[in-house]
């Protein structure tokens, strides 16, 4: 089942969420229940509460004013934790209650009886309880009444909940349910590629026309028949789910590789006809539209919109099946599959590894630091360059998981190097999405402290100047990183957004000149003039300037003349796997010692 992703825990959370969502008409009924409980039992106070891991929320109450408390401070947690009714005739004589603020202070509760509210899956969600400011006895009949009321409350809640997520005519899960299922997949971090297929069997204008001439009942019967027929014809798997999303319109949520594609569905549903009344049957033409997606990469509404858009495209063109944005669909699906593989690679830590490229002092050639660059040996496609997957990953939240992986690997490597002579700062490429996150600098600092490493050993390279400048959260994030002692570099300077005056708004240490600017130095006079003036300005502003993509000795000497500080490029070394890097470094060291 789609909805059972996280097992029991996720079911509990979902059931709780349904109850925690505000709903005035539901709570109005709950208030009648608490009134009934007080009247039937002759006890003045009563309330219904919901408990999650941290809080208690009072959904309806009578003579009891508290609306919310911490879970630990709630009286009801004893009922929820023990999963059985709790009756306390005199709270002052019960060590669990006697020192409680609601007992020794307002409203001075002396009597408490509560029963668990348990749903059909036996998950305890909260309590129904009665309270008084006087001690009481509580007979077995009274307890039985309270239990019965508790069961009634729960049946009501379940029916209420089911009604709002079920289409009344077809009995299938409805559009709200689809939206919620999509949101749930995204929230659960599910990265399995999925497909949403929209099916139109009877369009709205036609449905209204039929209803006008024949009444609503035959139309509703037809829709019911469709709802029965769909699973029989399509034979959905256990992970597939069929919804009614509008009158005569259905949707299937399925896996991206499942047989239930739009064209398959359209083919299977060809030539169906339905009996409206004796003797009157209508031919139904099925149109389908599909969209492939990774949960979380788009909002639920957007996924549905794409499906509907594909469906409308099919209807408009008079073809039975269409994919969303069909011209791009092939490559899009490819991309999705690749991102799916990346999610798996990150999760299982398989196929990804880092290479390190030295940064050297332009004057002396001494290594001053390293840049970590990711590599991926894909199980079937072989070695992939970051250009093939980083831009795609950056469009989804996968890039954060990737950055996390890179940083963890770098920290592990730095830790391993602690017992050697290698003591070089390593910089990582971080997306704005990462450091704009609240508390990111603290989080990174914490990681470094735990590994016993100074923050100066980790550098942050950022790009996307424009979006950083537009985002107060990103600017603040950079500021915090700087304060914590991480060195900040601006990557790819010299292409795109390179207005020097704006640099001052970012707390940068190093500016990395893009390789496109550097590679032209040997051939083009204009480029030389530009590079020279950029380097001079950056030096005047006290930045450390690093040239990327340095490929030959001529460029090295030009850059030296211009006052550039550091360089990185094939002339010194390609990005290297750890072992090769270590021998490169020791060779460099020998070089320095002997000549
Ligand atoms: P970048 O950060 O500008 O990295 C420098 C790129 O230039 C690297 O390409 C490097 O291999 C290449 N390079 C180094 N020296 C020379 C040279 O002398 N000549 C030429 N032609 N190229 C040189 P790579 O490793 O393919 O990475 C490409 C881009 O992918 C990187 O550009 C960076 O933006 C991104 N990337 C790589 N690893 C990561 C990562 O771990 N996380 C993130 N978010 N992005 C990464
Ligand atoms: Ca970089
Ligand atoms: Ca760069």
Image (spheres, helix red, strand yellow):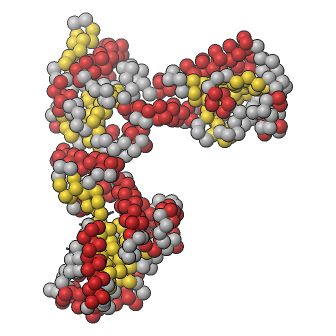
Asked whether residue 311 appears in the rendered view, the answer is no
Q: Is residue 350 above or below residue 249?
A: below
In this rendering, position of residue 379 left or right of residue 79: left
Q: In which quadrant of this rendering is ligand 1 seen?
A: bottom left
Outermost residue to the bottom: 561
Residue 92 percent location from the top left of the image: 83, 31
Total marks shown come to: 0
Q: Quadrant of residue 314?
A: top left
The residue drawn where x is 36% and y is 20% is 170
Q: Quadrant of residue 288?
A: top left
Question: Observer-nearest residue: 221 or 145?
Answer: 145
The residue drawn where x is 76% and y is 13% is 139
In this rendering, position of residue 385 left or right of residue 183: left
Residue 341 percent location from the top left of the image: 26, 48
Q: Is residue 338 above or below residue 220?
A: below
Asked whether residue 373 appears in the rendered view, the answer is yes
Q: Is residue 542 above or below residue 445?
A: below
Quarter of the image where the N terminus is located: top left
In this rendering, position of residue 378 left or right of residue 83: left
The residue drawn where x is 65% and y is 39% is 71
In this rendering, position of residue 423 left or right of residue 55: left
Residue 59 percent location from the top left of the image: 64, 32
């Amino acid at each position: 089942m789609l909805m059972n992703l996280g097992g029991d825990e996720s079911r509990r959370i979902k059931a709780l969420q349904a109850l925690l969502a505000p709903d005035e008409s539901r709570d109005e009924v709950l208030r009648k229940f608490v009134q009934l409980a007080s009247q039937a039992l002759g006890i003045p106070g009563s309330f219904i509460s919901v408990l999650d891991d941290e809080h208690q929320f009072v959904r309806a109450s009578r003579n009891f004013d508290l609306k919310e408390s911490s879970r630990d401070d709630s009286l009801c947690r004893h009922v929820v934790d023990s999963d059985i009714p709790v009756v306390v005739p005199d709270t002052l004589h019960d060590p669990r209650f006697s020192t409680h603020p609601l007992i020794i202070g307002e409203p001075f509760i002396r009597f408490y009886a509560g029963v668990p509210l348990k749903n059909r899956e036996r998950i305890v969600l909260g309590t129904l309880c009665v309270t008084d400011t006087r001690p009481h006895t509580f007979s077995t009949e009274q307890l039985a009444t309270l239990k019965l009321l508790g069961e009634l409350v729960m049946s009501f809640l379940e029916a209420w909940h089911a009604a709002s997520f079920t289409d009344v005519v077809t009995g299938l899960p409805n559009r709200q349910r689809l939206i919620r299922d999509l949101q749930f997949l995204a929230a659960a971090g599910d990265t399995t590629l999925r497909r949403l297929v929209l099916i139109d069997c009877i369009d709205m204008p036609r449905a209204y026309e039929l209803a006008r001439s024949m009444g609503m009942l035959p139309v509703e019967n037809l829709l019911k028949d469709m709802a029965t027929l769909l699973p029989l014809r399509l034979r959905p798997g256990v992970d597939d789910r069929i919804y009614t999303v509008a009158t005569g319109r259905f949707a299937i949520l399925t896996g991206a590789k499942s047989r239930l594609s739009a064209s398959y569905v359209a083919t299977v549903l060809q030539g169906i006809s339905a009996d409206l009344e004796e003797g009157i049957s209508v031919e139904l033409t099925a149109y389908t539209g599909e969209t492939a997606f990774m949960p979380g990469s788009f909002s639920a509404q957007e996924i549905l919109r794409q499906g509907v858009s594909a469906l409308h495209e099919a209807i408009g063109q008079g073809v039975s099946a269409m994919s969303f944005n069909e011209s791009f669909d092939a490559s899009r699906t490819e991309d999705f599959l690749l991102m799916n593989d990346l999610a798996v690679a990150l999760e299982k830590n398989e196929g990804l590894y880092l290479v390190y490229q030295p940064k050297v002092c332009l004057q002396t050639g001494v290594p001053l630091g390293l840049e970590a660059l990711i590599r991926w040996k894909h199980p079937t496609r072989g070695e992939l360059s970051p250009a093939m997957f980083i831009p795609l990953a950056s469009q989804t939240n996968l890039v954060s998981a990737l950055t996390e992986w890179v940083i963890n690997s770098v920290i592990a490597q730095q830790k391993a190097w602690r017992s050697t002579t290698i003591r070089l700062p390593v910089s990582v490429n971080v997306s704005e999405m990462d450091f704009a996150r609240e508390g990111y600098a603290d989080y990174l600092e914490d990681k470094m402290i735990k590994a016993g490493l100074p923050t100066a050993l980790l550098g942050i390279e950022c790009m996307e100047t424009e979006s950083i400048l537009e985002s107060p959260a990103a600017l603040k994030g950079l500021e915090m990183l700087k304060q914590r002692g991480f060195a900040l570099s601006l990557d790819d300077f010299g292409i795109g957004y390179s207005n020097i005056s704006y640099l001052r708004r970012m707390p940068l240490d190093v500016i990395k000149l893009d390789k496109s600017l550097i590679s032209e130095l040997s051939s083009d006079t204009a480029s030389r003039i530009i590079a020279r003036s950029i380097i001079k300005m950056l030096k005047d502003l006290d930045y450390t300037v690093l040239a990327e993509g340095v490929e030959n000795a001529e460029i090295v000497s030009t850059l030296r003349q211009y006052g550039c500080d550091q360089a990185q490029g094939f002339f010194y070394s390609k990005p290297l796997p750890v072992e090769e890097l270590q021998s490169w470094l020791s060779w460099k060291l020998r070089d320095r010692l002997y000549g």
